[in-house]
Image: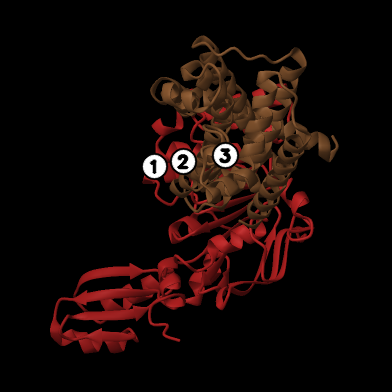
């Protein structure tokens, strides 16, 4: 296995405003050509992290390296290879869609021909051709985000920061955005994605870091994170109250509730383990009304790692 | 391309953006041009008869006042245009697009110089309109060809100073509403100078202020050029010094605020 060079690296990054510590020293490593997702609730420090790594904000401490360049000392070199799409559509509301793209082309010093070519190409790709001459005030939220990303692609960036790209979008627009992001990675772009949606991180990211209160509280692939949380179980609702205790013993249940007639059996939800449970139920002649399998999802991870019940 | 070439090319791009904004939403430009024209008509046709008599000239009356007030209105119109500069800059700052510009490898100052050049164009549109209306209602400037050339230079210089100052005000404002208020005082300054009546008719304290504020030399130089009389060296020096000082002050503040975010 070859180790891919890192596109984004943060070492002990901190940021404070006066006495308020927004980032308390975070470390991030994103290999080239992968999607990294920073997941966290509102106010966790996601946007601050993006702002520091995209040269918008100076860090209070630590180091950020993007595409091999230090974000503080060599900001212009970083700016030359990144694209940023913030939480709020960074478009010029007084221009139309096509003009916005042309503006980006000129600011990237692409030349007339190339600007024109890429503009038409991106309008086509993001399904904005029809709307290209309309004022932005007539665009839907999803269209504005698509234009926003198209603008960021005019400069052909190697590394793209997407700060909550689907917040406020309807489910359909969100799917479109996901497809766009997957296509970008296929083309070799590195993506740094922040989101508060677990489903989104699970769907897209190669690696996820969970940010909470300015600290990374967990990091890994979606699968690794799910394994962090023991939450997989099979839940049974029995037919007869007098069988509850017997079933719990036979199945080595984690817990049972005689009043509700329920039994919880720890399980990794594999076919083998389910078959074992079913065999045991058969053998012991236990009558079951309901049989549900719970696999841990990122929600379990998220809720157990952040916020709730964590009173420091 | 060298970094200087980038600065020019990016400034050109940003100016184009400003011009597009102006063309697409001409109401602001029309209002900026319209206000000084209304001011001119108001002062000439409503107050002009009486004020003209008070000037102490031989002829007096409305015609004398038109001759006196036109240079004042001309400078007022620059003060009016730069109100729009502050609003435009503040609008930009509150939009997400500025953060996009900040994360791009462009000459950062071009975002501001685009505004400066755009406003410069508005200043010339506006002063030309005011002069045109003044001539239409009977104003006859006595400037020579060289005087006209000098006038263009002086207006450009004054505009440069005031525009950079209002760029700084616009960028320092935390909202568009604030930005539309803070440069208001500039509109008042020509009144507290030699723009509408001679300063020696004012009470001592006001006169003292009038003599030392930048708009008095601005207006005096403009008046001398338009009437074809010799420009006083002191007034010209003060005009140049004030304009450059305001521009420098505005530039330094604006640049600092832009980079700091």
Q: How many marks?
A: 3
Q: Which mark is residue A303?
A: none
Residue B32 in percent (x, y) is at: 49, 29
Task: Tell me if label 3 and label 1 are in contact, CB under 8 Å.
Answer: no
Callout 1: SS: helix
The N terminus of chain A is located in which quarter?
A: bottom right
Residue A113 in percent (x, y) is at: 71, 21
| Chain in brown on the image | B
| Chain in red on the image | A
Q: Residue B200 carries which label?
A: 3
Q: How crowded is mark 3: few (under 14 residues within 10 Å), some or many (20 or more)?
A: few
Residue A206 in percent (x, y) is at: 59, 58
Question: To which chain does the residue with label 2 belong?
Answer: A
Q: Which of marks 2 and 3 is in front?
A: 3
Left or right relative to B35: residue A114: right
Question: To which chain does the residue with label 1 belong?
Answer: A
Callout 2: SS: helix
Q: How is the image coloured?
A: by chain
Task: Tell me if label 2 and label 1 are in contact, CB under 8 Å.
Answer: yes
């Amino acid at each position: 296995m070859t180790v891919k060079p890192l596109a984004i690296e943060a070492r002990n990054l901190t940021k404070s405003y006066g006495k308020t510590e927004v980032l308390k020293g975070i470390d991030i490593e994103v290999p080239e050509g992968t999607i990294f997702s920073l997941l966290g609730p509102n106010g966790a420090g996601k946007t601050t992290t993006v702002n520091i790594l995209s040269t918008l904000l100076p860090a209070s401490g630590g180091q950020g390296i993007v595409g091999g360049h230090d974000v503080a000392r060599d900001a212009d070199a970083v700016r030359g290879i990144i694209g940023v799409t913030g939480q709020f559509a960074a478009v010029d509301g007084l221009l139309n869609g096509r003009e916005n793209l042309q503006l980006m082309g000129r600011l990237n010093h692409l030349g007339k021909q190339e600007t024109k070519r890429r503009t038409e190409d991106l309008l086509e790709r993001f399904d904005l051709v029809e709307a290209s001459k309309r004022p932005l005030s007539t665009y839907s939220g999803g269209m504005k985000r698509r234009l926003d990303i198209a603008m960021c692609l005019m400069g052909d960036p190697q590394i793209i920061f997407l700060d909550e790209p689907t917040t406020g979008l309807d489910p359909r627009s969100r799917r479109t955005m996901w497809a766009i992001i997957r296509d970008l990675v296929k083309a070799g772009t590195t993506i740094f994605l922040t989101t508060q949606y677990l489903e989104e991180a699970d769907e897209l990211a190669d690696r996820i870091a969970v940010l909470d209160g300015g600290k990374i509280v967990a990091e890994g692939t979606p699968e690794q994170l799910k394994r962090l949380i023991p939450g997989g179980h099979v839940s049974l609702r029995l037919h007869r109250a007098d069988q509850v205790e017997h079933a719990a013993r036979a199945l080595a249940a984690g817990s049972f509730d005689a009043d509700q007639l329920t039994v919880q059996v720890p399980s990794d939800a594999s076919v083998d383990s389910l078959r074992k449970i079913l065999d045991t139920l058969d053998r012991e002649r236990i009558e079951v009304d309901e049989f549900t399998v719970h696999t841990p999802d990122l929600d379990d991870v998220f809720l157990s790692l952040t916020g709730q019940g964590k009173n420091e | 391309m060298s970094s200087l070439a980038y600065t020019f090319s990016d400034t050109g791009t940003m100016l184009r953006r400003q011009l597009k904004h102006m063309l697409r939403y001409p109401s602001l430009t029309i209002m900026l041009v319209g206000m000084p024209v209304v001011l001119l008509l108001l002062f000439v046709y409503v107050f002009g008869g009486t004020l003209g008599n008070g000037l102490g000239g031989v002829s007096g009356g409305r015609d004398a006042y038109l001759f006196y007030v036109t240079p004042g209105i001309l400078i007022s119109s620059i003060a009016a245009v730069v109100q729009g500069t502050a609003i435009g800059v503040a609008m930009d700052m509150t939009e997400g697009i500025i953060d996009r510009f900040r994360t791009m490898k462009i000459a950062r100052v071009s975002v501001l110089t685009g505004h400066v050049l755009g406003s410069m164009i508005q200043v010339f549109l506006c002063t030309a309109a005011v002069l045109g209306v003044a001539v239409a209602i009977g104003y006859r400037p006595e400037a020579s060809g060289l005087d006209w050339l000098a006038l263009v230079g002086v207006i450009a210089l004054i505009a440069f100073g005031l525009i950079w100052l209002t760029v700084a005000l616009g960028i320092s404002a935390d909202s568009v509403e604030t930005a539309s208020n803070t440069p208001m005082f500039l509109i008042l300054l020509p009144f507290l100078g030699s723009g509408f009546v001679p300063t020696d008719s004012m009470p001592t304290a006001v006169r003292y202020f009038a003599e030392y504020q930048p708009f008095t030399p601005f207006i005096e130089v403009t008046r001398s050029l338009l009437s074809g009389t010799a420009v006083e060296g002191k007034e010209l020096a003060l005009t140049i010094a004030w304009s450059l000082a305001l521009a420098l002050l505005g530039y330094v503040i604006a640049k600092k605020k832009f980079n700091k975010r």
